Amino acid sequence: MLSVTTISVNPYDADHRVERVMGSGFIIDQSGLVLTNSHVVFGRQVIMVTLDNGTTLPAKFVGADPVFDIALIRMPPPTTGTLPVARLGDSAKLLVGEEVFAIGNPLGLDQSLTRGIVSAMNRMLPGAAWSLTEPMIQTDAAINPGNSGGPLVDTCGQVIGINTANFPEAQNIGFAVPINLVKQVIPRLLEKGRVIRPWLGVQGQFVAPELKELLRLPLVDGFLVEATDPGSPAERKGLQGGLFEITVNGQPVLLGGDIITELNGVAVAAPETLGRILGGLQVGSLVRLTFARGGKTETVEVTLEERPVMPWDGSRRSGAASPPAQAGAAGRLPGTGRTLFF
C-alpha cells in the first residue's frame, strides 16, 4: 500500500486556486502500475506516490473511469529489487459477515489498518450511471478521508475491493468497489485510457406503483425523465424533463416529463430490464425510443454517442477523499430509491 498525493490548479478560483488531495493506492504489477480512485487523480496536474519506506516518486496518469471511480497511475519501477505487488482476490466469493481490513492513509495517518466485516453486498449508491448497476461492498471497517483508493483485503491478504466512499453523517458505513469489477475495467483503461459507454443523456427514475397510488395520476409504467443533459442525443431529439416538483417521503421529485416506455420495442418497466437492453448497445447504435407525453405515445430514433465526462462524475462519492467530496443529492421515488443516469 502507498499514499497518493495530488495537486490541481483552478485558475478561475482566486481564493482556492491550488487544491491538494491525499488518497491511497496499491501496486498491481512490477512495472509500477498502481490502482487508486478516479476522484483522487483524475484531472490533477501533479501526482506523487510515497512508498512505505518514505520514498516519494512522481507518477504518471494512465487512465480513469470516473463512473466506477477507478484509476490507474504508473510510478517508476525500481532499479534494483522488486515491488510489493498486491494479490487480487475474488469479490464474488465474499459473504456478509466475513472479516475484512481497510488499509490506507486516513486523515494523513499513513499505513493505517482498520478491521471490520462485510456488512452488505451489491449495495447501490445514489446516482448510478449508464450501466445502472454499481454493486458496492458495504463494510463497517472505518473508512475516512484519505482512505480513497486503498485496498480492502480479506483474511488471506487478497484485495477484494478498493475503498471509495463513506457516509459522513453515519457511523461505520463505508463502501468499496468490488475487485472483480475493477478487473473488468483495467484492460480498457490500459488500452484507451477510459471506459467507452454509449449515452442517451437522460436523468430520472422509474415510476413506482406506490407513486401512482399516492398521486392518483394516470402515470404509465416506465422511466420518468426528470432532466436531459445539455447537448445530449436526448435533448437534441426533444425529450422533455420534469416541469414541477413535489416532495415524496421528504425527497423532491420532478414530474411532468416524458416517460420512456420502450427501447427497441422492449417494454422498460424496471432497472434490470433497462440494464439488459443497454448492455447490448454500443456507441453509434440506433435506438428506437418510445415515450409517453401528455397522454399520447411518440416514437423517435436516436443514435447513441459516447458518454462524456460529466460535471458530477466522482463528486457522488461521500467523503473518502481528502478534502471530502460530498455525495450527490439524488431524488428518490418510493420503491426505487435512486436517480439513474444513462
Image (cartoon, rainbow, N blue to C red):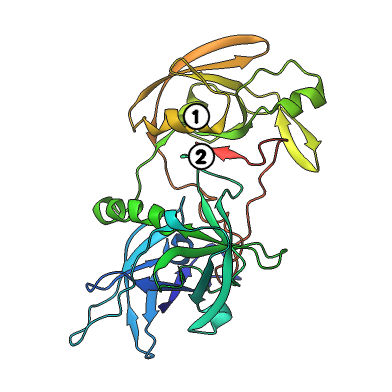
User: Can I make out residue 119 in this image?
Assistant: yes
When asked about the image quadrant of residue 114, the answer is bottom right
x and y, in percent, of residue 48 in the image: 38, 77
Relative horizontal placement of residue 229, taking residue 256 as reference (left or right)? left
Name of the residue lying farthest toward the bottom: 53
- Amino acid of disc 1: Leu
The dot on residue 274 is 1
Q: Specify which label sits upstream in the sequence, 1 or 2.
A: 2
x and y, in percent, of residue 257 in the image: 65, 24
* Residue at image point 49% right, 76% down: 103
Quarter of the image for the N terminus: give it: bottom left
- Amino acid of disc 2: Leu
When asked about the image quadrant of residue 179, the answer is bottom left
Which of 52 and 247 lies nearest the eye of the viewer? 52
User: Can I make out residue 11 in this image?
Assistant: no
Q: Secondary structure at mark 1?
A: helix
Tell me: residue 246, above or below residue 268: below
x and y, in percent, of residue 208 in the image: 69, 28
The dot on residue 156 is none
Which of 12 and 137 lies nearest the eye of the viewer? 137
x and y, in percent, of residue 281 in the image: 36, 30
Look at mark 2 in the image and give the residue it sits on: 132
Label 1 – label 2 distance at C-alpha: 8 Å
* Residue at image point 66% right, 68% down: 172
Count of numbered badges drawn on the protein:
2
Q: Secondary structure at mark 2?
A: loop
For the residues labelled 1 and 2, say whether their Cβ atoms are less than 8 Å apart. yes
Relative horizontal placement of residue 178, taking residue 55 as reference (left or right)? right
Callout 2 crowding tier (Cα within 10 Å): few <14, some 14–19, many ≥20: many
